[in-house]
Image (spheres, rainbow, N blue to C red):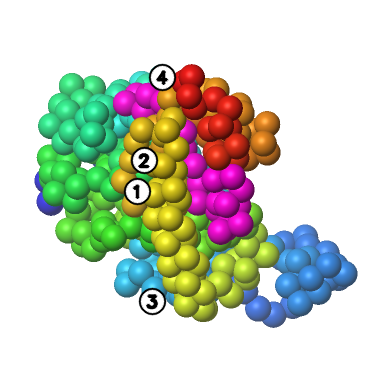
Amino acid sequence: MSAFDTLPLLRPNIRSLKPYRSARDDFKTGILLDANENPFAPEQHPEARLNRYPDPHFEALRARLSELKDVKPSQIFLGNGSDEAIDILIRMFCQSGEDTMVITPPTYGMYKVSADIQGIQTVEAPLNPDFSLDPEGVIEAVKTSGAKLVFLCSPNNPTANRLDAAHIRQVLEAVPALVIVDEAYIDFSAGESALRWLGEFPNLVVMQTLSKAWGLAGIRLGMAFASETIISYMMRVKPPYNVNTLTQQTALAALASPERTSGLIAQILAERERLAEALLKFPAVYKVEPSDANFLLVRVKDAPGWYKALAAEEVIVRYRGDQLHCTDGLRVTIGTPEENDRLLAAFEKLSAIVSPTT
Ligand SMILES: Cc1ncc(COP(=O)(O)O)c(C=O)c1O
Protein backbone atom coordinates (compact mmCIF):
# COMPACT_ATOMS: atom_id res chain seq x y z
CA MET A 1 0.00 0.00 0.00
CA SER A 2 2.60 2.56 -1.05
CA ALA A 3 0.64 5.39 -2.78
CA PHE A 4 -1.65 5.56 0.22
CA ASP A 5 -3.49 8.71 1.19
CA THR A 6 -3.88 8.86 4.98
CA LEU A 7 -6.09 11.99 4.96
CA PRO A 8 -9.39 10.15 4.42
CA LEU A 9 -8.66 8.20 7.62
CA LEU A 10 -8.82 11.38 9.70
CA ARG A 11 -12.08 12.25 11.43
CA PRO A 12 -13.89 14.80 9.22
CA ASN A 13 -13.97 17.42 12.01
CA ILE A 14 -10.18 17.12 12.38
CA ARG A 15 -9.72 17.55 8.64
CA SER A 16 -11.68 20.80 8.77
CA LEU A 17 -10.38 21.95 12.18
CA LYS A 18 -9.43 25.60 12.51
CA PRO A 19 -6.63 25.30 15.07
CA TYR A 20 -5.92 27.69 17.93
CA ARG A 21 -3.53 30.44 16.93
CA SER A 22 -1.64 32.92 19.03
CA ALA A 23 0.47 35.94 18.07
CA ARG A 24 3.43 33.79 19.16
CA ASP A 25 2.84 31.63 16.07
CA ASP A 26 3.99 34.66 14.04
CA PHE A 27 6.32 36.61 16.36
CA LYS A 28 8.61 35.21 19.03
CA THR A 29 10.72 38.25 19.94
CA GLY A 30 10.10 41.92 20.69
CA ILE A 31 8.13 43.58 23.50
CA LEU A 32 5.83 40.67 24.26
CA LEU A 33 2.46 42.12 25.26
CA ASP A 34 0.39 39.58 23.36
CA ALA A 35 -0.16 36.60 25.67
CA ASN A 36 -1.26 38.03 29.03
CA GLU A 37 1.88 36.71 30.69
CA ASN A 38 3.43 38.23 33.79
CA PRO A 39 6.43 40.36 32.69
CA PHE A 40 8.42 39.49 35.83
CA ALA A 41 10.47 36.30 35.83
CA PRO A 42 10.00 34.08 38.89
CA GLU A 43 12.77 33.44 41.39
CA GLN A 44 12.82 29.77 40.46
CA HIS A 45 15.05 29.01 37.45
CA PRO A 46 15.46 32.74 36.61
CA GLU A 47 17.42 31.88 33.46
CA ALA A 48 14.52 29.80 32.11
CA ARG A 49 12.10 32.73 31.71
CA LEU A 50 9.28 30.70 33.19
CA ASN A 51 6.94 33.68 33.13
CA ARG A 52 6.76 33.18 29.35
CA TYR A 53 4.86 30.45 27.54
CA PRO A 54 7.07 27.78 25.97
CA ASP A 55 7.73 27.61 22.24
CA PRO A 56 4.56 25.93 20.92
CA HIS A 57 6.52 24.53 17.97
CA PHE A 58 9.57 23.41 20.03
CA GLU A 59 11.75 24.52 17.14
CA ALA A 60 15.13 24.10 18.83
CA LEU A 61 14.30 20.56 19.92
CA ARG A 62 12.94 19.63 16.53
CA ALA A 63 16.10 20.95 14.88
CA ARG A 64 18.32 18.88 17.18
CA LEU A 65 16.20 15.75 16.81
CA SER A 66 16.18 16.22 13.06
CA GLU A 67 19.99 15.93 13.11
CA LEU A 68 20.01 12.96 15.47
CA LYS A 69 17.24 10.99 13.75
CA ASP A 70 17.85 12.07 10.16
CA VAL A 71 14.26 13.20 9.53
CA LYS A 72 12.90 16.66 8.68
CA PRO A 73 11.82 18.90 11.61
CA SER A 74 8.35 18.96 10.02
CA GLN A 75 8.19 15.17 10.48
CA ILE A 76 8.59 15.43 14.26
CA PHE A 77 5.83 15.81 16.87
CA LEU A 78 6.68 16.18 20.55
CA GLY A 79 4.31 15.41 23.37
CA ASN A 80 3.96 15.27 27.13
CA GLY A 81 5.33 11.71 27.03
CA SER A 82 4.53 9.21 24.26
CA ASP A 83 1.31 8.72 26.16
CA GLU A 84 0.13 12.09 24.81
CA ALA A 85 1.04 11.06 21.25
CA ILE A 86 -0.98 7.84 21.67
CA ASP A 87 -3.99 9.79 22.91
CA ILE A 88 -3.77 12.42 20.16
CA LEU A 89 -3.46 9.82 17.38
CA ILE A 90 -6.51 7.97 18.67
CA ARG A 91 -8.56 11.16 18.94
CA MET A 92 -7.45 12.38 15.49
CA PHE A 93 -8.39 9.25 13.62
CA CYS A 94 -11.08 7.45 15.60
CA GLN A 95 -14.66 8.56 16.07
CA SER A 96 -16.03 7.70 19.50
CA GLY A 97 -18.56 4.88 19.39
CA GLU A 98 -17.85 4.12 15.72
CA ASP A 99 -14.22 3.36 14.96
CA THR A 100 -11.92 0.52 15.93
CA MET A 101 -8.19 -0.04 16.30
CA VAL A 102 -6.03 -3.17 16.48
CA ILE A 103 -3.67 -4.06 19.32
CA THR A 104 -1.46 -7.13 19.69
CA PRO A 105 -1.63 -8.46 23.27
CA PRO A 106 0.31 -8.93 25.40
CA THR A 107 1.38 -5.33 24.93
CA TYR A 108 1.63 -1.88 26.52
CA GLY A 109 -1.58 -1.17 28.40
CA MET A 110 -2.07 2.50 27.50
CA TYR A 111 -3.20 1.79 23.93
CA LYS A 112 -6.37 0.15 25.23
CA VAL A 113 -6.84 2.58 28.13
CA SER A 114 -6.64 5.58 25.77
CA ALA A 115 -9.04 3.84 23.37
CA ASP A 116 -11.47 3.04 26.20
CA ILE A 117 -11.43 6.66 27.39
CA GLN A 118 -12.28 7.79 23.88
CA GLY A 119 -14.96 5.12 23.37
CA ILE A 120 -13.00 3.29 20.67
CA GLN A 121 -13.25 -0.46 20.35
CA THR A 122 -9.97 -2.40 20.39
CA VAL A 123 -9.73 -5.56 18.30
CA GLU A 124 -7.08 -8.01 19.41
CA ALA A 125 -4.64 -9.78 17.08
CA PRO A 126 -2.53 -11.57 19.69
CA LEU A 127 1.18 -12.21 19.41
CA ASN A 128 2.12 -15.87 18.98
CA PRO A 129 3.05 -17.80 22.15
CA ASP A 130 6.74 -17.17 21.32
CA PHE A 131 5.85 -13.42 21.29
CA SER A 132 6.41 -13.07 17.54
CA LEU A 133 3.97 -10.94 15.53
CA ASP A 134 1.30 -12.74 13.54
CA PRO A 135 1.18 -10.42 10.49
CA GLU A 136 -1.62 -12.35 8.77
CA GLY A 137 -3.67 -12.16 11.99
CA VAL A 138 -3.15 -8.39 12.20
CA ILE A 139 -4.01 -7.87 8.51
CA GLU A 140 -7.13 -10.02 8.87
CA ALA A 141 -8.19 -8.12 12.01
CA VAL A 142 -7.87 -4.78 10.18
CA LYS A 143 -9.78 -6.06 7.16
CA THR A 144 -12.68 -7.55 9.12
CA SER A 145 -13.03 -4.68 11.61
CA GLY A 146 -12.19 -1.75 9.30
CA ALA A 147 -9.75 -0.54 11.97
CA LYS A 148 -8.23 2.89 11.44
CA LEU A 149 -5.12 2.30 13.58
CA VAL A 150 -2.76 -0.57 14.40
CA PHE A 151 -0.47 -0.33 17.43
CA LEU A 152 2.70 -2.44 17.28
CA CYS A 153 5.26 -2.27 20.06
CA SER A 154 8.86 -3.17 19.25
CA PRO A 155 10.64 -4.01 21.47
CA ASN A 156 7.42 -5.05 23.12
CA ASN A 157 6.37 -4.36 26.69
CA PRO A 158 6.04 -6.66 28.71
CA THR A 159 7.62 -9.45 26.64
CA ALA A 160 10.92 -7.59 25.95
CA ASN A 161 11.43 -8.94 22.41
CA ARG A 162 11.62 -6.91 19.23
CA LEU A 163 9.24 -7.77 16.42
CA ASP A 164 10.55 -9.12 13.14
CA ALA A 165 11.15 -6.20 10.75
CA ALA A 166 9.79 -8.22 7.81
CA HIS A 167 6.55 -8.84 9.72
CA ILE A 168 6.11 -5.13 10.47
CA ARG A 169 6.69 -4.29 6.80
CA GLN A 170 4.17 -6.94 5.78
CA VAL A 171 1.53 -5.20 7.89
CA LEU A 172 2.52 -1.73 6.64
CA GLU A 173 2.21 -2.87 3.03
CA ALA A 174 -1.14 -4.61 3.43
CA VAL A 175 -3.39 -2.53 5.66
CA PRO A 176 -5.41 0.56 4.71
CA ALA A 177 -4.77 1.88 8.22
CA LEU A 178 -2.20 3.87 10.13
CA VAL A 179 0.48 1.63 11.69
CA ILE A 180 2.05 3.03 14.84
CA VAL A 181 5.31 1.38 15.81
CA ASP A 182 6.08 2.19 19.44
CA GLU A 183 9.84 2.10 19.90
CA ALA A 184 10.07 3.24 23.52
CA TYR A 185 12.83 0.65 24.13
CA ILE A 186 14.60 0.76 20.74
CA ASP A 187 17.84 2.18 22.16
CA PHE A 188 18.38 -1.03 24.16
CA SER A 189 17.84 -3.20 21.10
CA ALA A 190 20.22 -4.64 18.54
CA GLY A 191 17.49 -4.14 15.94
CA GLU A 192 17.19 -1.11 13.67
CA SER A 193 14.49 1.53 14.02
CA ALA A 194 11.49 1.61 11.67
CA LEU A 195 12.39 5.28 11.14
CA ARG A 196 14.32 4.23 8.05
CA TRP A 197 11.02 3.33 6.34
CA LEU A 198 9.33 6.70 6.89
CA GLY A 199 9.87 7.79 3.29
CA GLU A 200 8.44 4.54 2.02
CA PHE A 201 5.20 4.28 4.02
CA PRO A 202 2.86 7.26 4.40
CA ASN A 203 0.86 5.19 6.89
CA LEU A 204 3.79 4.72 9.31
CA VAL A 205 4.13 6.53 12.64
CA VAL A 206 7.17 5.76 14.81
CA MET A 207 7.07 6.70 18.48
CA GLN A 208 10.10 7.06 20.73
CA THR A 209 10.64 8.63 24.14
CA LEU A 210 13.25 10.23 26.39
CA SER A 211 11.79 8.25 29.33
CA LYS A 212 13.90 5.10 28.96
CA ALA A 213 17.44 5.11 27.53
CA TRP A 214 17.77 8.87 27.98
CA GLY A 215 16.88 8.57 31.65
CA LEU A 216 14.39 11.45 31.58
CA ALA A 217 11.03 9.92 32.51
CA GLY A 218 10.45 12.83 34.91
CA ILE A 219 10.44 15.54 32.23
CA ARG A 220 7.81 13.78 30.06
CA LEU A 221 8.99 14.00 26.50
CA GLY A 222 7.66 11.65 23.85
CA MET A 223 8.33 11.83 20.12
CA ALA A 224 6.31 10.81 17.10
CA PHE A 225 7.81 10.70 13.62
CA ALA A 226 5.63 10.46 10.53
CA SER A 227 4.81 12.09 7.19
CA GLU A 228 4.62 15.89 7.20
CA THR A 229 0.88 15.58 6.66
CA ILE A 230 0.22 13.47 9.75
CA ILE A 231 2.56 15.58 11.89
CA SER A 232 0.88 18.80 10.72
CA TYR A 233 -2.46 17.46 11.99
CA MET A 234 -0.94 16.31 15.28
CA MET A 235 0.40 19.83 15.75
CA ARG A 236 -3.06 21.28 15.11
CA VAL A 237 -4.76 18.94 17.57
CA LYS A 238 -2.32 19.19 20.48
CA PRO A 239 -2.81 21.76 23.26
CA PRO A 240 -0.79 24.82 22.18
CA TYR A 241 1.87 24.66 24.91
CA ASN A 242 2.01 20.91 25.55
CA VAL A 243 5.78 20.67 26.13
CA ASN A 244 6.78 22.94 28.99
CA THR A 245 9.85 25.16 29.07
CA LEU A 246 11.80 23.17 31.68
CA THR A 247 11.23 20.01 29.65
CA GLN A 248 12.34 21.63 26.40
CA GLN A 249 15.49 23.03 28.00
CA THR A 250 16.41 19.83 29.84
CA ALA A 251 15.84 17.72 26.74
CA LEU A 252 17.99 20.03 24.62
CA ALA A 253 20.82 19.82 27.14
CA ALA A 254 20.62 16.00 27.20
CA LEU A 255 20.43 15.68 23.44
CA ALA A 256 23.53 17.87 23.14
CA SER A 257 25.63 15.08 24.64
CA PRO A 258 24.37 11.66 23.53
CA GLU A 259 27.62 10.05 24.74
CA ARG A 260 26.30 9.97 28.28
CA THR A 261 23.24 8.05 27.12
CA SER A 262 25.39 5.60 25.15
CA GLY A 263 27.39 4.95 28.32
CA LEU A 264 24.25 4.37 30.37
CA ILE A 265 22.85 2.00 27.74
CA ALA A 266 26.07 -0.03 27.72
CA GLN A 267 25.94 -0.31 31.51
CA ILE A 268 22.28 -1.34 31.52
CA LEU A 269 22.90 -3.97 28.84
CA ALA A 270 25.81 -5.44 30.82
CA GLU A 271 23.62 -5.55 33.94
CA ARG A 272 20.79 -7.11 31.93
CA GLU A 273 23.07 -9.99 31.01
CA ARG A 274 24.42 -10.37 34.53
CA LEU A 275 20.94 -10.33 36.04
CA ALA A 276 19.50 -12.83 33.54
CA GLU A 277 22.30 -15.26 34.25
CA ALA A 278 22.14 -14.84 38.01
CA LEU A 279 18.35 -15.18 38.20
CA LEU A 280 18.39 -18.46 36.30
CA LYS A 281 20.42 -20.01 39.11
CA PHE A 282 17.49 -19.81 41.53
CA PRO A 283 15.44 -23.01 41.53
CA ALA A 284 12.10 -21.16 41.29
CA VAL A 285 13.16 -19.32 38.13
CA TYR A 286 12.62 -21.58 35.16
CA LYS A 287 13.01 -19.13 32.28
CA VAL A 288 14.28 -15.64 31.57
CA GLU A 289 12.90 -14.47 28.24
CA PRO A 290 15.42 -12.95 25.80
CA SER A 291 15.41 -9.17 26.11
CA ASP A 292 15.86 -6.29 23.69
CA ALA A 293 14.79 -3.80 26.34
CA ASN A 294 15.80 -2.49 29.77
CA PHE A 295 13.78 -5.15 31.57
CA LEU A 296 13.48 -8.90 31.82
CA LEU A 297 10.40 -11.07 31.74
CA VAL A 298 11.22 -13.71 34.31
CA ARG A 299 9.17 -16.91 34.62
CA VAL A 300 9.03 -18.05 38.18
CA LYS A 301 6.96 -20.69 39.93
CA ASP A 302 4.29 -18.98 42.10
CA ALA A 303 4.88 -15.56 40.57
CA PRO A 304 2.18 -13.79 42.66
CA GLY A 305 3.84 -15.19 45.82
CA TRP A 306 7.25 -13.95 44.69
CA TYR A 307 5.83 -10.56 43.76
CA LYS A 308 4.50 -10.10 47.30
CA ALA A 309 7.54 -11.59 49.01
CA LEU A 310 9.91 -9.35 47.03
CA ALA A 311 7.79 -6.31 47.90
CA ALA A 312 8.07 -7.25 51.57
CA GLU A 313 11.84 -7.08 51.03
CA GLU A 314 11.26 -3.63 49.50
CA VAL A 315 12.09 -4.80 46.00
CA ILE A 316 9.24 -3.84 43.68
CA VAL A 317 8.79 -5.66 40.40
CA ARG A 318 5.71 -5.97 38.17
CA TYR A 319 3.51 -9.07 38.14
CA ARG A 320 2.61 -9.83 34.51
CA GLY A 321 1.52 -13.46 34.86
CA ASP A 322 -2.06 -12.41 34.12
CA GLN A 323 -1.15 -11.24 30.60
CA LEU A 324 -1.63 -13.47 27.56
CA HIS A 325 1.27 -15.95 27.07
CA CYS A 326 3.03 -14.51 30.14
CA THR A 327 2.14 -17.23 32.65
CA ASP A 328 4.31 -17.03 35.77
CA GLY A 329 5.81 -13.75 34.51
CA LEU A 330 7.46 -11.08 36.61
CA ARG A 331 8.70 -8.04 34.75
CA VAL A 332 11.92 -6.83 36.29
CA THR A 333 13.45 -3.48 35.30
CA ILE A 334 17.26 -3.37 35.16
CA GLY A 335 18.37 -1.09 37.99
CA THR A 336 21.76 0.19 39.10
CA PRO A 337 24.31 -2.53 39.94
CA GLU A 338 23.50 -1.95 43.63
CA GLU A 339 19.76 -2.23 43.07
CA ASN A 340 20.24 -5.39 41.05
CA ASP A 341 22.35 -6.80 43.87
CA ARG A 342 19.47 -6.05 46.25
CA LEU A 343 17.11 -7.96 43.98
CA LEU A 344 19.47 -10.93 43.84
CA ALA A 345 19.98 -10.84 47.61
CA ALA A 346 16.20 -10.89 48.10
CA PHE A 347 15.91 -13.85 45.72
CA GLU A 348 18.67 -15.61 47.62
CA LYS A 349 17.01 -15.02 50.97
CA LEU A 350 13.53 -16.00 49.77
CA SER A 351 14.78 -19.06 47.88
CA ALA A 352 16.03 -20.45 51.15
CA ILE A 353 12.50 -20.13 52.52
CA VAL A 354 10.16 -20.82 49.62
CA SER A 355 11.80 -22.47 46.65
CA PRO A 356 11.97 -26.09 47.86
CA THR A 357 8.19 -26.18 48.21
CA THR A 358 7.14 -24.05 45.24
C1 LIG B 1 5.89 0.56 25.14
C2 LIG B 1 5.77 1.85 25.86
N1 LIG B 1 5.38 2.93 25.20
C3 LIG B 1 5.26 4.12 25.81
C4 LIG B 1 5.53 4.24 27.17
C5 LIG B 1 5.32 5.56 27.82
O1 LIG B 1 6.29 6.44 27.41
P1 LIG B 1 6.31 7.94 27.94
O2 LIG B 1 7.01 7.95 29.24
O3 LIG B 1 7.07 8.66 26.85
O4 LIG B 1 4.88 8.42 28.04
C6 LIG B 1 5.93 3.13 27.90
C7 LIG B 1 6.21 3.26 29.34
O5 LIG B 1 6.43 2.34 30.07
C8 LIG B 1 6.05 1.91 27.22
O6 LIG B 1 6.41 0.79 27.88
- Between the C-alphas of marks 4 and 3, the distance is 41 Å
Q: Are marks 1 and 2 in contact (CB under 8 Å)?
A: yes
- The residue wearing badge 4 is 97
Answer with the quarter of the image where residue 148 lies: top left
Q: Which mark is first along the chain, 2 or 3?
A: 3
Circle 2 crowding by C-alpha within 10 Å: few under 14, some 14–19, many from 20: some
Give yes or no for residue 302 being in the magenta stretch.
no
How crowded is the residue under tag 4: few (<14 C-alpha within 10 Å), some, or many (20+)?
Answer: few
Relative height, residue 324 to residue 1 (above, below): above
According to the picture, the residue beneath numbered tag 1 turns out to be 291
Looking at the image, residue 117 sits to the left or right of residue 90; the answer is right
Q: CA distance from mark 3 to mark 2?
A: 37 Å
- Residue 67's label in the rendered image is 3
Can you identify the residue that label 2 sits on? 288
- The three-letter amino acid code for the residue at tag 2 is Val
Cα gap from disc 1 to disc 2, whole angstroms:
9 Å
Q: Nearer the viewer, mark 3 or mark 1?
A: 1
Say if the magenta span includes residue 343.
Answer: yes
Residue at 35% across / 48% down in the picture?
A: 291
Please give the range of residues in magenta.
Answer: 321-345
Mark in front: 1 vs 2: 2
Q: Nearer the viewer, residue 192 or 245?
A: 192
